[in-house]
Image (cartoon, grey):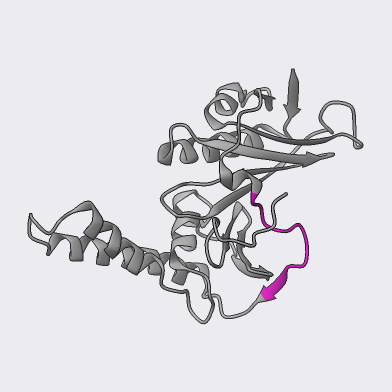
């Protein structure tokens, strides 16, 4: 049994909150864990947003046998959540599961360059509120026969595929950051690019999106 010793109770609470939000969008969600030493990255993919969510978790000590041991496994988000003991600051790594396709397509580790043109966080949150209001208004205007799932999806794609400010970042990435608790008042936000990937980073987590989609050909798999 592999036990993760998290840095403190708040780190355990934040991990539990992140897993709970992922499970809200997908009750059978899986997460990929990658860690070395005292740093652990938890990757998830909320299906509604078509992005990768990344939560960095601080460990109190290297898991298992020390700094020379690395962790790389895909597990059930629900089982991992059940194992989190906030008062003890620990979590147990569940047994590995057959990873969904996205788990083999992760952003690069390096080569990230700062992208300018990202609005301030308060403007990003206003952008999301405006998008939600527009979606609600446009769907309420539809007659009963026109309010099909296909039409609702079309309207949603049109709104959330728009780009943010002067960047190529789709609005759905910001929406995901807001929904997963990454875009909080008082927290800064920055945008980075590496190859075909864009990464919206805040102190509470990151959202990565690949231009052309996660299922596009030519993606490096690792």
User: Which residues are drawn in magenta?
Assistant: 105-114
- The residue positioned 46% from the left and 74% from the top of the image is 163
Check the image and report above or below for 203 versus 125.
Answer: above
Q: Position of residue 16 (x, y in %)?
A: 56, 34
* 150 sits left or right of 129 in the view: left
Identify the image quadrant of residue 218.
bottom right
In the shown orientation, is residue 82 left or right of residue 11? left
Q: Is residue 25 left or right of residue 120?
A: left
Asked if residue 113 is among those painted magenta in the image, a careful observer would answer: yes
Closest to the observer: 128 or 107? 107
What percent of the width, then of the height, locates residue 42? 65, 42
Horizontal and vertical percent for residue 49?
Answer: 44, 54
| Quadrant assignment, res 199 | bottom right
Residue occupying the point 66% across, 52% down: 106
Question: Chief secondary structure of the magenta span?
Answer: loop
What is the number of callouts on the image? 0
Toward the front, the furthest residue is 217
In percent of width and height, residue 129 lies at 34, 63
The residue under the point 61% across, 28% down is: 97
Q: Residue furthest top?
A: 1
Q: Residue at x 62, y 44 (%)?
A: 103
């Amino acid at each position: 049994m592999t036990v993760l010793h998290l840095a403190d109770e708040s780190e355990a609470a934040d991990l539990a909150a992140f897993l709970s939000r992922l499970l809200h969008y997908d009750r059978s969600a899986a997460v990929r864990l990658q860690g070395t030493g005292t740093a652990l990255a938890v990757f998830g993919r909320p299906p509604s947003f078509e992005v990768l969510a990344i939560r960095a978790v601080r460990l109190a000590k290297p898991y298992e046998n020390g700094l020379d041991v690395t962790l790389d496994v895909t597990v059930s988000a629900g089982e991992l959540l059940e194992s989190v003991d906030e008062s003890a600051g620990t979590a147990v790594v569940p047994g590995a599961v057959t990873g969904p396709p996205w788990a083999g397509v992760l952003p690069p580790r390096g080569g990230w360059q700062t992208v300018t043109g990202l609005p301030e966080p308060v403007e990003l949150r206003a952008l999301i509120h405006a998008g939600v209001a527009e979606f609600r208004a446009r769907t309420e205007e539809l007659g009963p026969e026109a309010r099909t799932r296909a039409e609702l999806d079309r309207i949603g794609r049109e709104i959330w595929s728009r780009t943010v400010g002067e960047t190529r970042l789709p609005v759905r990435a910001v929406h995901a950051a807001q929904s997963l608790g990454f875009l909080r008042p008082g927290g800064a936000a920055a945008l980075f690019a590496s190859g075909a990937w864009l990464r919206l980073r805040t102190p509470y987590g990151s959202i990565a999106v690949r231009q052309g989609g996660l299922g596009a050909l030519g993606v490096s798999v690792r």
